[in-house]
Amino acid sequence: MSETRYAVVGAGIIGLATARELARRRPGAPITVVDKETSVASHQTGHNSGVVHAGIYYPPGSLKARLCAQGRSLLRELCEERKVPYEECGKVVVARDEAEVPALRAIEARARQNAVPGLRWVGAGELAEIEPHASGVAALHSPQTAIVDFRKVAEAMVEPGCGFTVRLGFEVRSIRSSGDTVVLSGPPGEEPVVADQVVICAGLQSDRVARLVGDHASRGPMIIPFRGEYWRLVPGRSRLVRGLVYPVPDPRYPFLGVHFTRRVGGHVDLGPNAVLALAREGYRRRDVDAGDLAEALRSRAFWRMARANWRAGWHEMAGSLSKKTFVARAATLVPDLRVEDVVRAPAGVRAQAVDPDGSLVDDFRITRSGPVLSVVNAPSPGATSSLAIAEHICDQL
């Protein structure tokens, strides 16, 4: 009997982790990863915050909670093995005043159900010892929350002897079944990829690639891109933050709010916000794709989401258009912050899955149609959880 042939669409961290796990479980099996870009980790993996999450916020029992805990441990082991810098700089979630304390207590209860390692409740005095420039009446301290360069993690997976092949510059144009096999066709002149099992890990393009399969995807969520914009502390002011400083999330908005993130390279970023991007891969304000925009505006899911979240949209847009407003919000956490302390930093784009009723898909979502398995939604902590998501996918295969 011949070996099962596998194809993975998408050379981001989840696609590469899936190929790596398949190679571990099926040594010698033909495994091909395809991606339309000319390098791995070109989009969400290479443009995220670099935070290795400890699992503080996620509903207990959810895929996010379970796979984040497993993935963090696996990721640390991989980084140690491949000599990828991994720094446990720690994180504080800060209640800025007494009104935020009940919400912080609720977060603490959830985090303890998720067995977040080393979690501590600290008062204002201890907070000042951990983050001298942060201001708050209380905080949760997660000492094992870490930072890493996820692009380097992805690149470390594609080393000689990794057990799979990566074909870059291969944009999947069609997916069709032919007997017991699946044929992935790319640009004209490119040899198709023939497989028995296919995994779609296409991130910002995941709904479009899944639609090529032709059945369940037409009823599934669509991807709405949200650009996450950052400002960066100038070198002389990076001392304002030692690790990661987050606010208690505002329940009126679906995102965590502007926070401070130390990067592996030593600089500190403020952000991200979450503003609608005018292109699936729109990392700059001037990036506009008429086709992407028209697709969103034709969608009932988009308009239902917009109606439910218009206040959040205006809030985020105000911070995007005004540096002063953005910095003022961040200064509620670190009062010594000044407008002149920050410069513009590179942005990322979040692939937000939106169900037909307009609700934001929160948990990881993975669906299957015959021999094709689709990662429909894998937002943060998707990178942290990537190796555990890969195990979960391979269990299903």
Image: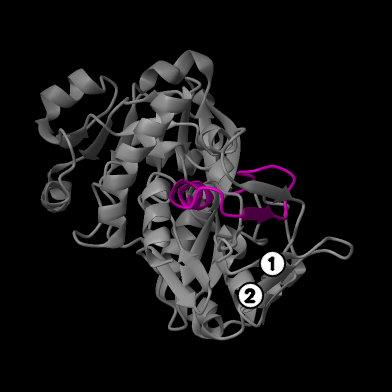
Label 1 crowd (10 A; few <14 / some 14-19 / many >=20): many
Relative side of 227 to 168, left or right: left
> In the rendered structure, are the residues bearing label 2 and label 1 in contact, judged by CB atoms less than 8 Å apart?
yes
Res 337 seen here:
no
Residue 130, placed above or below residue 53: above
Relative side of 123 to 234, left or right: left
Relative side of 52 to 104, left or right: right
Residue at which label 1 appears: 194
Q: Is residue 30 magenta?
A: yes
How is the rendered protein coloured? one colour
Range of magenta residues: 18-43
Q: Please, what is the three-letter code of the amino acid marked with disc 1? A: Val
> Which callout, 2 or 1, points at the residue further toward the start of the chain?
2
Q: Please, what is the three-letter code of the amino acid marked with disc 2? A: Thr
Image quadrant for the C terminus?
A: bottom left
**Numbered badge on residue 181:** 2
Q: Which residue shows up at 18% across the image and 26% down it? A: 127
